[in-house]
Amino acid sequence: MAQYPTLTATPRDEFGKGFARRLRTAGRIPGVVYSGTTENVHFSVDRIEFTAVIRNQGVNAIVELDIDGEKHLTMVKHIDQNILNLNIDHVDLLAITRGERVEVEVPVISEGEVFSGAMLIQEVDTLLIEADVLEIPEEIVVSVEGIEAGNVINAGDIKLPTDVTLVDDAETLVFNITFEEVAEVPEEGEAAEGEAGAEAPAAE
C-alpha cells in the first residue's frame, strides 16, 4: 500500500457544533490532524472525495493532505459516522512519517471451504499487528480449504506479509472448525407415540 491519495483540504479556525453543521451542509467534513511534535491542525475536506478514499483504501487509509500548500502525511485514526445517513461527520487523522512503524487493527477474512461436514466459526474479526505505516495490509486472508472438524487456527498460526509482525497474543483463537449441527430425527416408535398423543383429544 505504498500508493496513497492526496486531497486538498481547507484550514479552519472556527469550532463548535453550529460551524461543523454548516460545513457538513456544504458537503465538507471537519477534521483534525493530531501530532506528537507539532500543534494539531484543524481542517475541512470534501466529503465525497474523502469517503471515496475510505471506500477504496479501508479504515487504515493513508492520506496526504494539502493544506494551503503544506503537505501533511497522515493515517486515519478515528471516524465519526452519522447513524442515520451513514455520512462521515468528523475525522481524526494522525500525522506520520515515512519509515515509521505503527500498530493497527487489520480485518481477517477466510478463503476456501472447510472439509465436508465441518463448520467454520470465526471468533475474532481483526488482528492487532505492527507494520510500516506505508505498507499496512488492507486485510489478512487465511486459507481454510479442506480443514477438518476438530481443528483451530490461532493468531500465531497465520502467515503474515513480509515485515508485518503480530502484536496480539499468539494464542488468540481466530477460527474454530467444528462439526456441523445435525437436527435430531425422532425414532419410529417415538414418532408414532407423538402422533397418537396428538390425535387423542379428537377421540373425545
Image (cartoon, grey):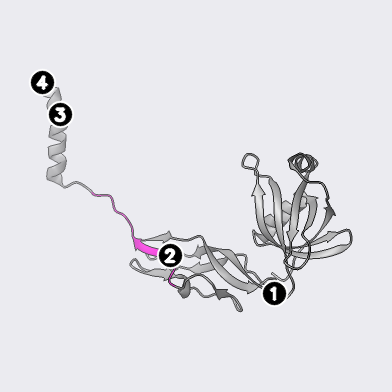
**Residue 175 tag number:** 2
Few, some or many C-alpha atoms within 10 Å of disc 2 (few <14, some 14-19, many ≥20)? many
3D distance between C-alphas at marks 3 and 2:
48 Å
| Quadrant that contains the N terminus | bottom right
3D distance between C-alphas at marks 3 and 1:
76 Å
Which residue type does callout 1 highlight? Glu
Q: Residue furthest bottom?
A: 163
Question: Residue 39, position in %: x, y?
Answer: 78, 62
3D distance between C-alphas at marks 2 and 4:
56 Å
Instruction: Give the mark nearer the N terminus: 3 vs 2.
Output: 2
Q: Which circle, 2 or 4, is nearer the viewer?
A: 2
Circle 4 residue: 204
Q: Judge whether residue 181 is colored magenta.
A: yes
From the viewer's perspective, tell me whether residue 136 is left or right of residue 178: right
- Front residue of this view, candidates 131 and 187: 131
Instruction: Classify mark 1: helix, strand or loop.
Output: loop
Q: Which circle, 2 or 1, is nearer the viewer?
A: 1
Please give the name of the residue rendered at 12% of the width and 33% of the height, measured from the top-left corner.
Answer: 196
Instruction: Classify mark 2: helix, strand or loop.
Output: strand
| Quadrant that contains the C terminus | top left
